[in-house]
Image: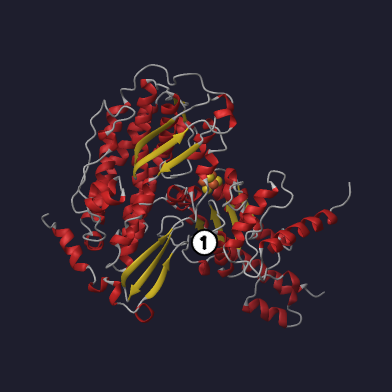
Amino acid sequence: MEMIPHVAKARRRANPYLDLGSYDPEADLMVLNLGPQHPSTHGVFRLKLYLDGEIIVKVVPFVGYLHRGVEKLCEKLTMVQLIPIFDKNDYVSPMMNEQSLVMAFEALLGIEVPRRARYVRTLLAELQRIASHLLWLGAFAMDLGGALGGGSTLFMYCFRERELILDVFEDLTGCRFHYNTHMIGGNRHDVPAGWATKVHAAINAIETRLPEYETFLITNDIYIERTRGVGVVDGQLSMDLGITGPVLRAGGVDHDLRRDAPYHCYDEIEVRVATATAGDCEARAAVRMAEIRESIRLVRELIDNIPEGPLGARKPIKTPLAEKAAKGHAYAAVESPRGELGIYVIGGGDNKGASPYRLKIRSPSLHVLGCLPYILPGHSVSDAVAVLGSVDPIMGEVDR
Amino acid sequence: MAVDESYRTYSHPVYDFMMKVPGLDVMTTTVDKLLSFGSEASLWIFPVATSCCGIEFMALAASRVDADRMGAIVRGSPRHSDVMIVAGTITVKMAPRVKKLWDQMPEPKWAIAVGSCAISGDFYRNIYSVVPGIDTFIPVDVYVPGCPPNPEAMMHGLIRLQEKIRASANGRDVNREARPEAVHHQRLPRLPILGDPARTSELDRQQVASAASLGWWDELNLEQALDSVAKDLADESESEPKV
Ligand code: SF4
């Protein structure tokens, strides 16, 4: 494979002492714990770094500080009760969690979702993607510290724009970010009158401000110095570790479930998948920025053509036990802002079969964290913070 | 009349000087008011933002709600801060760290529990790994309910805390008795919640076991822990008035 310039630079950065065999661990290495309570670990995540001076030689990640036993809870509660609980897994994009869960249950129960509901789900997913990436951008800018106009400037800007989308969601569902708007077989909240105008206003505002952020990012020398060639995750490593989402696409692998395995209404619209080749922090940031633009384009396309028809395949269920007993098993996956979020469910558990027998969450953040021991050695401690920010893990989803 | 010194929870050079010189006692109330005005108007926040409520906490600090205009700045170190805001689920694995951070904060200090998880454990309450509320191991001054509470609600919680600080400066010692004594050994989290009908004894046993397995009850084995729990329970039922 031809050496990509950024990758070549990254290889040169690597410390010659990477082989731990040449180390006397007692004499040379210092152990530094980054986390679990640290402003830049995006939740409660601990990295044990073995340092030679400022250079990392070995990394051991520790998870489990937010283990809430969701998969165990799934065996006790009925399918209807589970939907609001799944909002809390990946709390930066709750819509995707609900959608993956109800899609798995619909596949299990064999329910066909009406086109209008699928359409609204597509719309909500794209809006959620914009909000999630905006939060990532703000947090990433905080991690890079002084690079982006004094630390918290971009954070403040991004939250200003994110609030616009949360307002739109609040109009629709009544909640700011734990929505509970999906039901098995449809959606609960219909689009209110005049909602399209508000969505247009919100995405127009965001689109006009995006160039401002890119001026911050692309033309800032400190930003380039801190991200270019740092933390290279190439496509092969991603595929070996099961990494999906922007991290995979930044490594040059063109894979997106929205286009490759369409769900909802994605088969009716054309999704232009953004990719990059370098695989470093800069490329990941560029892919996410491109995804914000692409989502804005998709929302524009979708919002004015919401089809007529029923919003649910059947009447809303009034009691949690009213769900039919389900046999068999099903898997459903959505492309969340972090990658492939999949739910595997086996039906027919407690409560006369209204609970799942077993439910497994395939969360993209957990897989992404697996790459840290491979890519961090050779970098300095401050680079570790930049890399952690750029892969965007959400600990609620990792520990579940 | 001598001022009862037992209410003092913090020391200050000026305050200490006042207490030493006879006749200056009467000025201490004024100094007290001044100090609590200072505390109230510059609450520096140390966030323990573990999960979803932490994202709403970020919205509290960000542009729209903007806690800065109350003098509440978010700091990354417990040693700089006056108020700890616990926003999110606290697990058995995380609880000792939270307690350690709380111990590092200088007096006077306050704690706010944000969200049902920090208050009571929310619907994860009966899960083996979740602490049923942070008031099982640190004293909480203000509770902000919600799942998650809006940033405006968190702002309201901050305002209530300011009211509380002001009230304690005026001689009313608000809720001081409710603070647990400082503990020598780590007894965190205090599991199980005693006398809670929603929790089975088997669940209590599992949680005590998982807490003990963390190794902060070095000298304490599981049987002893359960015995002390049973003794606590007996003490509490004795002290209650008969109806
Ligand atoms: S109270 Fe609700 S929003 Fe807050 S941390 Fe718990 S589950 Fe998340």
Residue B123 vertical placement versus A376 (above, below):
above
Q: Residue furthest right?
A: B242
Q: Quadrant of the N terminus of chain A?
A: bottom left
List x then y, in percent, for residue A175: 49, 36
Pointer 1 local density, CA inside 10 Å: few below 14, some 14–19, many at least 20: many
In the rendered image, which residue does mark 1 sit on? B46
Q: Image quarter for residue A296?
A: top left
Image-quadrant location for residue A267: top left
- The residue most toward the top is A309
Residue A178 visible somewhere in the drawing: no
Can residue A250 be seen in this snapshot? yes
Q: Is residue A273 above or below residue A54?
A: above
Q: Residue furthest left?
A: A2
Query: Which residue is at 52% across, 60% downward?
Result: B45
Residue A384: x and y, percent?
33, 63
Q: Nearer the viewer, residue A312 or B167?
A: A312
In this rendered view, identify the residue nearer to me: A344 or A61: A344
| Quarter of the image where one finds residue A152 | bottom left
Q: How many marks?
A: 1
Find out if the beta carbon at label 1 lies less than 8 Å from the nearest ligand 1 atom. no
Amino acid at circle 1: Phe
